[in-house]
Amino acid sequence: MQNNLKTPISTNNLYIIFTKQIKSLQNIFIETLTQQKAQHYRTIKSLKKEIEEIHRNSPSPPLIPTSVNLQIPNRKNISKTDSLTPNSPTIAPPVKLTKYLLNPLAYSSKRSKLYFFLNQLQNKLNSNINRYPTPNS
């Protein structure tokens, strides 16, 4: 029988070998992360372009009428002090709200479902437009 045992490796040599391997793995990890980061930036940039194109190509929501029905002053509604203030304040009719639509499911970050999600969101916002405040409300 032959003895195939090699000479034992010292602790110091093991430390050097492991340190080199760890540094090599760290470099590979950093390089992979850098490549992934660059790919994510490219994906985000292309998604932003797609969203901008969708916004450019989609019709804008209808405008909400914001006019106020003021009385035109005449002899009947001018007060005794000759001001233009009506004798009785006008009361706006109650606003009838549209049926509430449920929110679309949360976006799952799958690129293939982005257009569908944006359409659902736009439909909800357009259908329930009188449920959201405006700058004039």
Image (spheres, grey):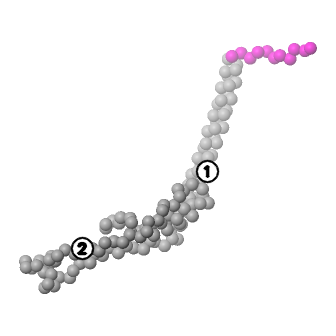
**Helix, strand or loop status at disc 1:** helix
In x, y percent, where is residue 108?
57, 54
Residue at left offset 41%, top offset 70%: 98
Residue at left offset 57%, top offset 60%: 114
Please, what is the dominant secondary structure of the magenta stretch? loop
Is 101 colored magenta in this rendering?
Answer: no
Position of residue 68 in the picture relative to residue 132 (left or right): left
Q: Nearer the viewer, residue 59 or 119?
A: 119
In x, y percent, where is residue 36?
61, 46
Q: Is residue 22 above or below residue 73?
A: above
Type of the residue with mark 1: Gln
Residue at left offset 60%, top offset 44%: 34
Badge 1 crowding class, 10 Å Cα cut-off, few under 14, some 14 to 19, many 20 or more, is: few
Q: Is residue 64 above or below residue 115?
A: below
**Helix, strand or loop status at disc 2:** loop
**Quadrant of the snapshot with the C terminus:** bottom left
**Quadrant of the snapshot with the N terminus:** top right
Type of the residue with mark 2: Ile
Q: Nearer the viewer, mark 2 or mark 1?
A: 2
In x, y percent, where is residue 101?
47, 65
Position of residue 32 in the picture relative to residue 61 (left or right): right
Please count the marks in the image.
2
Task: Specify whether residue 51 is in view.
Answer: no
Circle 2 sits on which residue?
91
The stretch of residues the image draws in magenta is: 1-11
Q: Which mark is residue 39?
A: 1
Q: CA distance from mark 2 to mark 1?
A: 59 Å
Q: Is residue 75 above or below residue 41?
A: below
Give the quadrant of residue 75.
Answer: bottom left
Q: Nearer the viewer, residue 76 or 118?
A: 76
Residue at left offset 50%, top offset 64%: 121
